[in-house]
Image: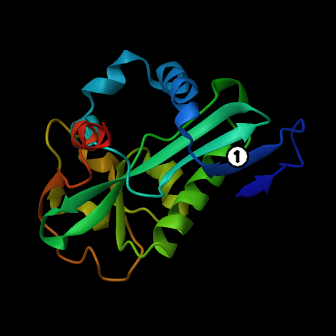
Amino acid sequence: MDTWIKPDLPPVRVTIGAECAGDLPAREALLDSAFGPGRFRKSSEKLRRGRFPAEGLAFTARDGDRVVGTVRLWNIAAGTAGEALLLGPLATDPSLQGQGIGGRLMAYAISEAARLGHRAILLVGDAPYYNRFGFERRFAQGLSMPGPLEADRFLGLELVAGSLDGASGMLRPTGRHAAIAQRKAA
């Protein structure tokens, strides 16, 4: 768990930690607010649909009891590079944007992915924002995603140097199926 207070803005105490089952309604409302209904048509969603996030890699930011940010990482195969993670969506409460909550979530998620031994992370997002975390277009250059994609927004980060060298091919989901896991639990 990571607690942070940004000194140059009104005090907002943000605690970052593992997402809980009880966070799901607030998380969905936050994502609806941040991205609208179009979020379900994105290429990244095709890789997430019907899957659980990667084990131990779903996080929320809280201001007290209120969920004010979210990020998840998902198991994928990155073409010839093999196993990797897909990051997203990352969202913060619109009323608190600009206070560094998204940046703290990103740093926390990347750190945890590295700690758990993952080799690479891919995402679709604004390069100027994600470059500061080490994401670069060159790492995703030879890879593709199902569905339409703005190539300049498709970025990668190597947690292990060389893990995306020369990677090519289509991303595909490899994570646990939500429906199968729910049937086994019943």
Q: Residue at x 35, y 69 (%)?
A: 120
Percent x, y for residue 62? 71, 39
- Residue extending farthest to the bottom is 161
Left or right: 80 in relation to 94:
left
Q: Residue at x 44, y 44 (%)?
A: 126
Q: Nearer the viewer, residue 35 or 25?
A: 25
Question: x, y (%) of residue 66?
Answer: 72, 30
Name the residue furthest top. Answer: 37
Q: Is residue 17 left or right of residue 163?
A: right
Q: In the rendered view of the protein, which quadrant contains the N terminus?
A: bottom right
Disc 1 residue crowd, few under 14, some 14–19, many 20+, Cα 10 Å: some
Which residue corresponds to mark 1? 100
Q: Quadrant of the C terminus?
A: top left
Report how many numbered discs are placed on residues in the image: 1
Residue 186 falls left or right of residue 132: left
The kind of residue tagged 1 is Gly
Q: Is residue 70 left or right of residue 2?
A: left
Does 14 appear above or below 56? above
Residue 157: percent from left, percent from top:
39, 66
**Going 42% across and 76% down the picture, which residue do you hit?**
117
Residue 80 against residue 91 in the figure, above or below? below
Nearer to us in this view, 161 or 116: 116
